[in-house]
Amino acid sequence: MPDGGWEPVEPWRVGTRTGPAPAGGDAPATGGRLARSPRRGRLWLGAAALAVIGVVWSVAGRGSGDGGGGGPDGGDPDGEELSEIRERTDEERARDVVADDRADAARRTFAQASRRLELGGSYTYAGTVHAPAPSDARPAHAPAPDVTVEGEVLWPLRTHEIAVDATGRAAETVTIGPTIWQRRAPTREGLAAIAYEFAGDVTTWNGAVVPFGAGAARLPGWLTATTDRVRRSEVDGRRTFAATLPADRLGDTGSGPPRVDGEVELVVDLDRNPLHIEVTVPGEAATGSAWRVSLDIGGIGDTVAIDVPNGELPSVTVGPSLADVQAAGIAAPVELAQLPEGWILTAIALDTDEGRADCARLRLDYNNVESGGRTPDWLALSVLPPMCAVRVATEGTPLEAGAFIGWPATFPGGEGAVLSDGRTTVEYVSSLPSADALRLFETVEPYDPATRPSVLTAP
């Protein structure tokens, strides 16, 4: 036994006095002490600190209770309280995770539904519409503000729809690019006997702030443009989501752009295929909305044929009149009479500020808008007085197209030609091979902005 009468003890054990007390002190009243080795002093201090914290926590917990030594069932109230706090925190964290997951699921659902419609390339729809007047968002000149509709879309440029009102009157509408054709009849069955008539142009068809296309072709773009997307419910495998459509993304609805944001309801199946899309602009109308389309979606990717009415290709028809062009100094303006299928006349403009007096320029832009993902071909035509044409080298074999004779030319935008018939000079530049571009130029006819090109016939 060591000096002083104390037995050696392991750290964290209570020692027992077996001999006289050390000099200069009394024996502990309890007959023992906490023993430690000099090398493990830090461990002893840590244990003591934990013991003090436990006592303080225990006293604080009991002080807030009924003064008893345990919980109602004799258990430890402090442990129960800690467990309750931990459980509540976990629940809140789980709710946050669920909320984040739902928001992300809603965002992905709208994006994937939009892509399904675009990548499918075609879809059909049927439902009801409330639209007080025709517009870019609803180009059909319906027989009444409230109609039932059936239609199909070859995304993004072609739509076909039949609308019938409560009395049975019917209207059939086709849009290709910016151009609208329509026919009407007292009954749906009577439509086939009526010829289509040109019904105007969709001014915002080519996409900018407003989604690409016209009418129901805008559905994918509207889904993509939504904000504040939320999940509403799920019934029998049909999941319903809601979102906001900013007013500037909807486009004109017949009385100008809507003053308030639209509301979108999207129903999808478990694979996020769109089953139903409803777009509503709130208002004071009898239907409870100022404008609304409610459509069931089907036939995604099915074969759909939407023919060009009357064999005419679509084109813009808003341009300077023949009188205005002639007054600007272009005596005998021309335009292309035929285009390959899929091409349209996309723009007409009269430039009178060419930096030279009496040198106005009539510009007509033609583009392939159904290129199937390839880089689209194009041809830009400029018509001007003979004295205003650029000078080109007259070497080699001249080009001939009817009464026009000229030479190849290189322009900043690419390769082309300059040709003249003595009264009118035409410059063109194109992405097409030179022979193909000349083939199109051979179809020129007198300019008339009200006419549209027909499909190019075989040579």
Image (cartoon, rainbow, N blue to C red):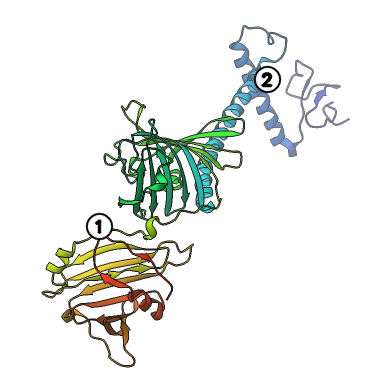
Q: How far across and down, in percent of the image, does residue 262 sit?
A: 37, 36
Of residues 342 and 17, the one drawn nearer to the viewer in this rendering:
342
Residues tagged 2 and 1 counted as in contact (Cβ below 8 A)? no
Q: Nearer the viewer, mark 2 or mark 1?
A: 1
62 horizontally vs 321: left or right: right
Q: Which residue of the protein is positioned furthest toward the right in this rendering?
A: 1
Q: How far across and down, in percent of the image, does residue 436 sit?
A: 40, 77
Q: In the image, is residue 415 above or below residue 277?
A: below
Q: In the image, is residue 1 above or below residue 348?
A: above
Q: Residue at x 39, y 47 (%)?
A: 193
Q: Residue at x 55, y 39 (%)?
A: 105
Q: Residue at x 61, y 39 (%)?
A: 270
Q: Which residue is mark 2?
A: 79
Circle on res. 318: 1
| Type of amino acid under label 2 | Gly
The quadrant in which the N terminus is found is top right
Residues packed near mark 1 inside 10 Å, few (<14), some (14 to 19) or many (20 plus): some
Residues packed near mark 2 inside 10 Å, few (<14), some (14 to 19) or many (20 plus): few
Q: Residue at x 25, y 72 (%)?
A: 382
The quadrant in which the C terminus is found is bottom left
Q: In the image, is residue 156 above or below residue 297?
A: below
| SS for dot 1 | loop
Can you tell which quarter of the image residue 350 is in?
A: bottom left
Q: How far across and down, in percent of the image, does residue 342 sit?
A: 42, 63
